[in-house]
Protein backbone atom coordinates (compact mmCIF):
# COMPACT_ATOMS: atom_id res chain seq x y z
CA UNK A 1 0.00 0.00 0.00
CA UNK A 2 1.37 3.40 -0.99
CA UNK A 3 1.66 6.25 1.50
CA UNK A 4 -0.80 8.15 -0.69
CA UNK A 5 -3.42 5.43 -0.23
CA UNK A 6 -2.88 5.43 3.54
CA UNK A 7 -3.39 9.20 3.71
CA UNK A 8 -6.36 9.12 1.33
CA UNK A 9 -8.14 6.48 3.41
CA UNK A 10 -7.69 8.61 6.51
CA UNK A 11 -8.95 11.73 4.77
CA UNK A 12 -11.99 9.93 3.39
CA UNK A 13 -12.86 8.39 6.75
CA UNK A 14 -12.42 11.64 8.71
CA UNK A 15 -14.04 14.07 6.28
CA UNK A 16 -15.90 12.55 3.33
CA UNK A 17 -17.76 9.71 5.05
CA UNK A 18 -19.24 12.04 7.73
CA UNK A 19 -20.23 14.50 5.01
CA UNK A 20 -22.07 11.79 3.08
CA UNK A 21 -23.86 10.85 6.27
CA UNK A 22 -25.24 14.31 7.03
CA UNK A 23 -25.45 16.54 3.93
CA UNK A 24 -28.71 16.87 1.98
CA UNK A 25 -28.82 16.07 -1.72
CA UNK A 26 -28.32 19.66 -2.89
CA UNK A 27 -25.24 20.15 -0.74
CA UNK A 28 -23.89 16.76 -1.86
CA UNK A 29 -24.29 17.83 -5.48
CA UNK A 30 -22.54 21.17 -4.94
CA UNK A 31 -19.77 19.65 -2.85
CA UNK A 32 -18.97 16.85 -5.30
CA UNK A 33 -18.98 19.26 -8.24
CA UNK A 34 -16.57 21.62 -6.45
CA UNK A 35 -14.23 18.88 -5.23
CA UNK A 36 -14.08 17.22 -8.64
CA UNK A 37 -12.80 20.48 -10.13
CA UNK A 38 -10.29 20.84 -7.31
CA UNK A 39 -8.89 17.30 -7.18
CA UNK A 40 -9.50 15.54 -10.51
CA UNK A 41 -7.53 16.79 -13.51
CA UNK A 42 -7.49 15.47 -17.06
CA UNK A 43 -4.31 14.92 -19.06
CA UNK A 44 -3.04 18.03 -20.81
CA UNK A 45 -4.62 18.49 -24.22
CA UNK A 46 -7.83 16.62 -23.36
CA UNK A 47 -10.93 17.86 -25.16
CA UNK A 48 -14.48 18.05 -23.86
CA UNK A 49 -17.70 18.88 -25.64
CA UNK A 50 -21.41 18.60 -24.99
CA UNK A 51 -24.03 17.37 -27.40
CA UNK A 52 -27.51 15.89 -27.45
CA UNK A 53 -27.59 12.14 -28.07
CA UNK A 54 -30.89 10.32 -28.31
CA UNK A 55 -32.58 13.20 -26.52
CA UNK A 56 -30.08 13.11 -23.63
CA UNK A 57 -27.32 15.62 -22.87
CA UNK A 58 -23.91 13.93 -22.99
CA UNK A 59 -20.35 15.11 -22.58
CA UNK A 60 -17.54 13.71 -24.68
CA UNK A 61 -14.10 13.27 -23.11
CA UNK A 62 -11.23 12.62 -25.48
CA UNK A 63 -7.49 12.68 -24.87
CA UNK A 64 -5.11 14.24 -27.35
CA UNK A 65 -4.38 11.65 -30.02
CA UNK A 66 -7.40 9.46 -29.29
CA UNK A 67 -8.70 7.95 -32.53
CA UNK A 68 -12.12 7.21 -33.87
CA UNK A 69 -13.32 3.69 -33.20
CA UNK A 70 -15.22 1.99 -30.39
CA UNK A 71 -16.75 4.41 -27.88
CA UNK A 72 -16.65 4.05 -24.10
CA UNK A 73 -20.17 4.81 -22.82
CA UNK A 74 -19.55 5.69 -19.17
CA UNK A 75 -22.26 6.05 -16.52
CA UNK A 76 -21.23 8.12 -13.51
CA UNK A 77 -21.91 7.17 -9.90
CA UNK A 78 -23.53 9.13 -7.10
CA UNK A 79 -26.34 7.00 -5.65
CA UNK A 80 -28.55 8.07 -8.61
CA UNK A 81 -28.87 11.38 -6.71
CA UNK A 82 -25.67 13.36 -7.40
CA UNK A 83 -22.68 13.34 -9.74
CA UNK A 84 -22.52 14.33 -13.39
CA UNK A 85 -20.54 13.92 -16.58
CA UNK A 86 -18.29 16.77 -15.41
CA UNK A 87 -17.43 15.18 -12.04
CA UNK A 88 -16.11 12.07 -13.84
CA UNK A 89 -14.75 13.46 -17.08
CA UNK A 90 -11.12 13.76 -15.90
CA UNK A 91 -10.95 10.02 -15.13
CA UNK A 92 -12.46 9.20 -18.51
CA UNK A 93 -10.03 11.51 -20.27
CA UNK A 94 -7.24 9.58 -18.56
CA UNK A 95 -8.77 6.30 -19.69
CA UNK A 96 -9.09 7.78 -23.18
CA UNK A 97 -5.36 8.52 -23.14
CA UNK A 98 -4.59 4.95 -22.07
CA UNK A 99 -6.87 3.28 -24.63
CA UNK A 100 -6.89 5.75 -27.52
CA UNK A 101 -10.71 5.69 -27.45
CA UNK A 102 -13.22 8.51 -26.95
CA UNK A 103 -15.58 8.42 -23.98
CA UNK A 104 -19.22 9.52 -23.87
CA UNK A 105 -20.71 10.43 -20.47
CA UNK A 106 -24.50 10.88 -20.30
CA UNK A 107 -26.05 13.31 -17.87
CA UNK A 108 -28.90 10.91 -17.16
CA UNK A 109 -31.76 12.22 -15.06
CA UNK A 110 -31.21 12.14 -11.31
CA UNK A 111 -33.49 11.22 -8.42
CA UNK A 112 -35.57 12.33 -6.63
CA UNK A 113 -36.64 14.78 -9.31
CA UNK A 114 -36.65 11.90 -11.80
CA UNK A 115 -37.09 8.55 -10.10
CA UNK A 116 -36.60 5.06 -11.53
CA UNK A 117 -36.80 4.05 -14.37
CA UNK A 118 -35.77 7.44 -15.86
CA UNK A 119 -32.07 6.55 -15.56
CA UNK A 120 -32.29 3.35 -17.57
CA UNK A 121 -34.50 5.06 -20.16
CA UNK A 122 -31.89 7.78 -20.71
CA UNK A 123 -28.91 5.45 -20.91
CA UNK A 124 -30.73 3.06 -23.24
CA UNK A 125 -31.55 6.01 -25.54
CA UNK A 126 -27.87 6.97 -25.60
CA UNK A 127 -26.80 3.40 -26.32
CA UNK A 128 -29.26 3.05 -29.20
CA UNK A 129 -28.00 6.29 -30.75
CA UNK A 130 -24.32 5.37 -30.37
CA UNK A 131 -24.74 1.79 -31.56
CA UNK A 132 -26.03 2.90 -34.97
CA UNK A 133 -22.51 4.11 -35.85
CA UNK A 134 -20.06 2.68 -33.30
CA UNK A 135 -19.06 -0.37 -31.38
CA UNK A 136 -19.58 0.40 -27.69
CA UNK A 137 -17.91 -0.56 -24.42
CA UNK A 138 -20.10 0.19 -21.40
CA UNK A 139 -18.61 1.28 -18.07
CA UNK A 140 -19.65 2.80 -14.78
CA UNK A 141 -18.90 3.21 -11.10
CA UNK A 142 -20.95 2.67 -7.95
CA UNK A 143 -24.62 3.32 -8.84
CA UNK A 144 -23.41 3.98 -12.38
CA UNK A 145 -21.81 0.53 -12.36
CA UNK A 146 -25.14 -0.96 -11.41
CA UNK A 147 -26.77 1.11 -14.12
CA UNK A 148 -24.24 -0.25 -16.61
CA UNK A 149 -25.30 -3.81 -15.76
CA UNK A 150 -28.96 -2.81 -15.86
CA UNK A 151 -28.40 -1.32 -19.31
CA UNK A 152 -26.71 -4.52 -20.47
CA UNK A 153 -29.68 -6.50 -19.14
CA UNK A 154 -32.10 -4.33 -21.15
CA UNK A 155 -29.97 -4.60 -24.29
CA UNK A 156 -30.02 -8.38 -24.09
CA UNK A 157 -33.71 -8.54 -23.14
CA UNK A 158 -34.68 -6.38 -26.12
CA UNK A 159 -32.45 -8.26 -28.57
CA UNK A 160 -30.33 -5.23 -29.44
CA UNK A 161 -26.79 -5.51 -30.80
CA UNK A 162 -24.67 -6.07 -27.69
CA UNK A 163 -21.67 -4.01 -26.61
CA UNK A 164 -18.09 -5.27 -26.91
CA UNK A 165 -17.75 -5.49 -23.14
CA UNK A 166 -18.61 -3.96 -19.79
CA UNK A 167 -16.46 -2.73 -16.92
CA UNK A 168 -17.40 -1.44 -13.47
CA UNK A 169 -15.69 0.11 -10.46
CA UNK A 170 -17.31 -0.83 -7.12
CA UNK A 171 -20.73 -1.45 -8.71
CA UNK A 172 -24.02 -1.25 -6.81
CA UNK A 173 -25.85 -4.30 -8.20
CA UNK A 174 -28.35 -5.05 -5.43
CA UNK A 175 -30.57 -2.32 -3.99
CA UNK A 176 -32.08 -4.83 -1.56
CA UNK A 177 -28.67 -4.50 0.16
CA UNK A 178 -28.68 -8.18 1.10
CA UNK A 179 -24.93 -8.74 0.70
CA UNK A 180 -23.09 -9.73 3.88
CA UNK A 181 -20.49 -7.01 3.33
CA UNK A 182 -23.12 -4.29 3.92
CA UNK A 183 -23.00 -5.13 7.63
CA UNK A 184 -19.54 -6.73 7.83
CA UNK A 185 -17.84 -3.65 6.35
CA UNK A 186 -20.09 -0.92 7.73
CA UNK A 187 -17.32 0.35 10.02
CA UNK A 188 -14.41 -0.52 7.70
CA UNK A 189 -15.66 1.27 4.57
CA UNK A 190 -13.86 4.62 4.42
CA UNK A 191 -16.42 6.30 2.13
CA UNK A 192 -19.92 4.84 2.14
CA UNK A 193 -22.21 4.91 5.14
CA UNK A 194 -25.10 2.55 5.80
CA UNK A 195 -27.01 5.23 7.72
CA UNK A 196 -28.78 6.64 4.67
CA UNK A 197 -29.46 3.53 2.60
CA UNK A 198 -33.21 3.74 3.14
CA UNK A 199 -33.34 7.46 2.36
CA UNK A 200 -31.31 7.22 -0.84
CA UNK A 201 -33.20 4.13 -1.99
CA UNK A 202 -36.50 5.88 -1.39
CA UNK A 203 -35.43 8.83 -3.54
CA UNK A 204 -34.35 6.54 -6.36
CA UNK A 205 -36.89 3.72 -6.29
CA UNK A 206 -39.89 4.90 -4.32
CA UNK A 207 -42.34 2.04 -3.81
CA UNK A 208 -41.19 0.03 -6.84
CA UNK A 209 -39.73 -3.48 -6.64
CA UNK A 210 -36.06 -3.41 -5.56
CA UNK A 211 -35.55 -6.79 -7.25
CA UNK A 212 -36.42 -5.39 -10.69
CA UNK A 213 -33.25 -6.19 -12.71
CA UNK A 214 -33.27 -2.63 -14.05
CA UNK A 215 -32.63 -1.50 -10.46
CA UNK A 216 -30.84 -4.60 -9.09
CA UNK A 217 -29.12 -6.32 -12.02
CA UNK A 218 -27.92 -9.03 -9.65
CA UNK A 219 -31.35 -10.59 -10.24
CA UNK A 220 -31.16 -10.35 -14.04
CA UNK A 221 -30.37 -12.69 -16.91
CA UNK A 222 -27.15 -12.22 -18.88
CA UNK A 223 -26.80 -15.25 -21.15
CA UNK A 224 -25.00 -14.17 -24.31
CA UNK A 225 -23.42 -11.14 -22.66
CA UNK A 226 -19.94 -9.94 -23.71
CA UNK A 227 -16.91 -10.10 -21.37
CA UNK A 228 -17.06 -8.22 -18.07
CA UNK A 229 -14.31 -6.64 -15.96
CA UNK A 230 -14.88 -5.47 -12.36
CA UNK A 231 -12.84 -4.23 -9.44
CA UNK A 232 -13.83 -3.51 -5.83
CA UNK A 233 -12.14 -2.95 -2.47
CA UNK A 234 -12.28 -5.71 0.12
CA UNK A 235 -13.37 -3.27 2.86
CA UNK A 236 -16.27 -1.77 0.90
CA UNK A 237 -19.88 -2.32 1.88
CA UNK A 238 -20.47 -3.08 -1.83
CA UNK A 239 -17.79 -5.79 -1.97
CA UNK A 240 -20.38 -8.56 -2.18
CA UNK A 241 -22.34 -6.76 -4.88
CA UNK A 242 -19.36 -7.38 -7.16
CA UNK A 243 -18.52 -10.83 -5.78
CA UNK A 244 -22.10 -12.10 -6.17
CA UNK A 245 -22.44 -10.43 -9.57
CA UNK A 246 -19.45 -12.37 -10.83
CA UNK A 247 -20.98 -15.58 -9.51
CA UNK A 248 -24.22 -14.83 -11.37
CA UNK A 249 -22.34 -14.09 -14.58
CA UNK A 250 -20.24 -17.25 -14.29
CA UNK A 251 -23.34 -19.39 -13.69
CA UNK A 252 -24.88 -17.92 -16.84
CA UNK A 253 -21.81 -18.60 -18.99
CA UNK A 254 -20.47 -15.04 -19.14
CA UNK A 255 -16.70 -14.49 -19.14
CA UNK A 256 -15.80 -12.17 -16.28
CA UNK A 257 -12.80 -10.83 -14.36
CA UNK A 258 -13.06 -9.55 -10.77
CA UNK A 259 -10.11 -7.89 -9.02
CA UNK A 260 -10.67 -7.45 -5.27
CA UNK A 261 -8.15 -4.97 -3.87
CA UNK A 262 -7.07 -4.85 -0.20
CA UNK A 263 -7.92 -1.63 1.70
CA UNK A 264 -8.85 0.29 -1.45
CA UNK A 265 -11.63 2.88 -1.02
CA UNK A 266 -14.84 3.14 -2.99
CA UNK A 267 -14.17 3.98 -6.68
CA UNK A 268 -10.48 4.72 -6.08
CA UNK A 269 -9.62 5.05 -9.83
CA UNK A 270 -11.22 8.51 -9.76
CA UNK A 271 -8.17 9.65 -7.74
CA UNK A 272 -5.82 8.94 -10.65
CA UNK A 273 -4.06 12.30 -10.16
CA UNK A 274 -2.76 11.48 -6.70
CA UNK A 275 -3.01 7.74 -6.14
CA UNK A 276 -0.56 5.23 -7.67
CA UNK A 277 -3.07 2.43 -7.16
CA UNK A 278 -5.64 4.36 -9.20
CA UNK A 279 -3.27 4.68 -12.13
CA UNK A 280 -2.44 0.98 -11.89
CA UNK A 281 -6.11 0.00 -11.99
CA UNK A 282 -6.79 2.23 -14.98
CA UNK A 283 -3.81 0.72 -16.80
CA UNK A 284 -5.08 -2.79 -16.02
CA UNK A 285 -8.50 -1.83 -17.34
CA UNK A 286 -6.99 -0.28 -20.47
CA UNK A 287 -5.15 -3.53 -21.17
CA UNK A 288 -8.40 -5.46 -20.85
CA UNK A 289 -10.17 -3.03 -23.16
CA UNK A 290 -7.44 -3.39 -25.76
CA UNK A 291 -7.81 -7.18 -25.55
CA UNK A 292 -11.43 -6.87 -26.71
Image (cartoon, rainbow, N blue to C red):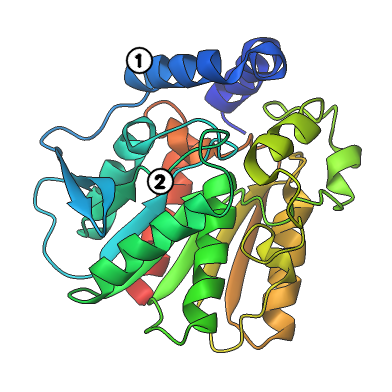
Q: Is residue 148 left or right of residue 288?
A: right
The residue positioned 26% from the left and 46% from the top of the image is 58
Residue 38 marker:
1
User: Does residue 277 appear anywhere in the picture?
Assistant: no
Viewport quadrant of the C terminus: bottom left
Q: What crowding class fits label 2: few (fewer than 14 Cα within 10 Å), some (14-19), or many (20 or more)?
A: many
Measured along the vertical axis of the image, is residue 150 above or below residue 188?
below
Q: Is residue 125 left or right of residue 155?
A: left
Q: What crowding class fits label 1: few (fewer than 14 Cα within 10 Å), some (14-19), or many (20 or more)?
A: few
| Image coords of residue 232 (percent x, y) | 64, 49
Viewport quadrant of the N terminus: top right
At mark 2, the secondary structure is loop
Whether residues under marks 1 and 2 lie with C-beta atoms below 8 angstroms apart, the answer is: no
The residue positioned 26% from the left and 45% from the top of the image is 57
Q: Nearer the viewer, residue 128 or 67?
A: 128
Q: Nearer the viewer, residue 199 or 235?
A: 199
How many callouts does the rendering have?
2
Q: Nearer the viewer, residue 262 or 157?
A: 157
The residue positioned 37% from the left and 29% from the top of the image is 273
Measured along the vertical axis of the image, is residue 151 above or below residue 164?
above
Q: Which residue is mark 2?
A: 108
| Image coords of residue 228 (percent x, y) | 53, 71
Measured along the vertical axis of the image, is residue 4 above or below residue 110?
above
Tell me which label, 1 or 2, sits earlier in the chain. Answer: 1
Quadrant of the rendered structure where residue 200 is?
Answer: top right
At mark 1, the secondary structure is helix
| Image coords of residue 210 (percent x, y) | 76, 55
Residues at marks 1 and 2, CA–CA distance in whole angstroms: 23 Å
Amino acid sequence: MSWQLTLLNRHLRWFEKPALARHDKDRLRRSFAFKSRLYFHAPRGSRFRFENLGGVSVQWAQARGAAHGPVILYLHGGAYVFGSSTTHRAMLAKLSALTGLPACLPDYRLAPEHAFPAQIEDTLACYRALRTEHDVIIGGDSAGGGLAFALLHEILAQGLAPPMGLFAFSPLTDVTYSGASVTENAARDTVLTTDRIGEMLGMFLGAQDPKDPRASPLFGRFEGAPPVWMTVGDTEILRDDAVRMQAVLSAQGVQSVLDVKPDHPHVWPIFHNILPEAGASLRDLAGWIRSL
